Amino acid sequence: MANVTIERGARKPQKVIINDLTLVAPDRNRKDIAKLKSSIQRAESIYTPSRVQLYDLYHDITTIDGHLAGVLQKRKDFVLNKCIQFVDKNKRKIDAFDKIIYSNKFNRLIELIIESKFWGVSGIEFIIGKEFDFEEIPRKHIRIEKNMIVKSQYDYEGTPIDELPFVWTVGRKNDLGLLLKCSMYALYKRSGFGDFAQYVEIFGQPVRIIYYDAYDTKVKSELRKILDESGGSLCMMIPKQAQFQMLDGKTSNGTGELQERLIQNCNAEMSVAILGNTETTTSSSSSGYAQSLTQSQQQLEITKSDIAFVQNVLNEQWFLNILKSYGYPVDGGSFEFEFEIDLDNLLKRVQIDTFVSSKVPVDDDYYYTAYGIPKPDNYDELKARQEEERKAALLAMQSNNEPQPDEPKNSKKNLFDKLADFFGFAPKNGASEDF
């Protein structure tokens, strides 16, 4: 992608490449493991790589499979629900960016950045104007391996992205995304549902079996008429002279548990591939609070990784130049997600920091960074005043602990002396005869 340095008053009419693309509807034909394998081979080709078939398959499973769509949205929501702000070099929030940050377009931009992990790539073309705007580039038109945009999804040559100053792609070469790990399970799950539906259709109703004499054609025709007029459930007419046995699998799979276990296992594998766990989405018979808590912490680590990824992408100089062309003051600033407080972890950290600071000196900047506290502009002045107040308090404490002038420094009174002071004079060696 080319560097963008355009002044607001000197813009030329922009040629939007998205308007020149020849779009094709997604392929909704039957998908199976054989097509998945051939799609991967096409995408991994050295000389003529193409992700068209693979992305059609991705589109098919993400728009039909409810569980897969749910876990994908769940991972995106973990980042979309976090607060983000634009700060200057002193970590002070710049309010001028609130309009763009709280817009639907910016929310969709963050979503596309996260989706690049699922699909392997995302493409955006910014529309230069007074307001922040962009168009999504269909992924089937992006040749990330060759760094170009093609007019037709079937083309192998197109326009280099470096020659398109307003086109931004997020992704890595040879990365087919996390959906590649889910595709096989989504297809097996779809087949499992088909088998389950067929099982219910066949064995969900009682089977009617009629035996007749093979030589009595009149009885046979009458029985056929009765069966046709008595409902649509499965029926069979068998001659008495024939041997018949139906093995319907009800003995080992009377409740359809076999198909259900296949579907659950496929869902579990897709949850692990996207979220890193299963217990935060569905629960198993062996799950408990400790297991759910552990897997929730594992998912939190994935969320932290996604937040760092989105923050790094938004702080790329290329994107900051785009925002500058819209008139936003980006010089010296950066996007940052707001610090969220976990009281349990914060309490543990305070205890550790207190112990460490009692052993070794700790820089004040560490506390500002660790606890998300903004550093004041007049830090040096406040620090000096705080040090003076600390010394004054120390001197006052020492003066309160010093002995009084009329009291001996090392005088110590026992209990008898203190009682004598309270009740008056009393002899220590017993009462005198004159007393």
Image: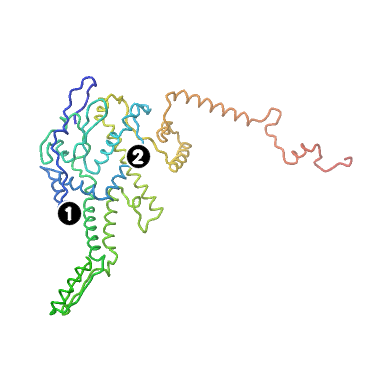
Q: Identify the element where label 2 is drawn.
A: loop
| Residue sitting at x 72%, y 40% | 414
Looking at the image, residue 236 sits to the left or right of residue 353; the answer is left
Closest to the observer, 39 or 434: 39
Query: What colouring does the structure picture have?
Result: rainbow
Nearest to N terminus: mark 2 or mark 1: 1
Quadrant position of the C terminus in the picture? top right
Residue 28 or residue 422, whichever sits in front: 28
Which quadrant of the structure image shows residue 326?
Answer: top left
Q: Name the residue under label 1.
A: 33
What kind of residue is marked 2? Answer: Asn
Q: How crowded is mark 1: few (under 14 residues within 10 Å), some or many (20 or more)?
A: few
> x%, y% of residue 26?
17, 45
Query: At x 28% / y 60%, what residue is drawn?
Result: 260
**Residue topped by disc 2:** 81
Q: Is residue 390 left or right of residue 323?
A: right
Label 2: few (<14), some (14–19) or many (≥20) C-alpha neighbours in 10 Å:
few
Q: Who is closer to the viewer here, 416 or 119?
A: 119
Q: Residue 246 carries which label?
A: none
Whether the residues at callouts 2 and 1 have beta carbons within 8 Å, the answer is: no
Split into 4 quadrants, where in the image is the N terminus?
Answer: top left
For the residues labelled 2 and 1, the Cα–Cα distance comes to: 36 Å
Looking at the image, how many numbered discs can be counted on the residues?
Answer: 2
Which SS class for mark 1?
helix
Name which quarter of the figure residue 406 lies in.
top right
The answer to whether 407 is drawn above or below residue 65 in the figure is above
Amino acid identity at mark 1 = Ile
Q: Where is residue 12 in the image (x, y as percent from the top left)?
A: 18, 23
Q: Residue 340 in the image: state x and y as whole percent.
A: 40, 38
State left or right for residue 287 relative to residue 1: right
- Residue occupying image coordinates x 70% and y 31%: 408
Residue 395: horizontal and vertical position, in percent?
58, 27
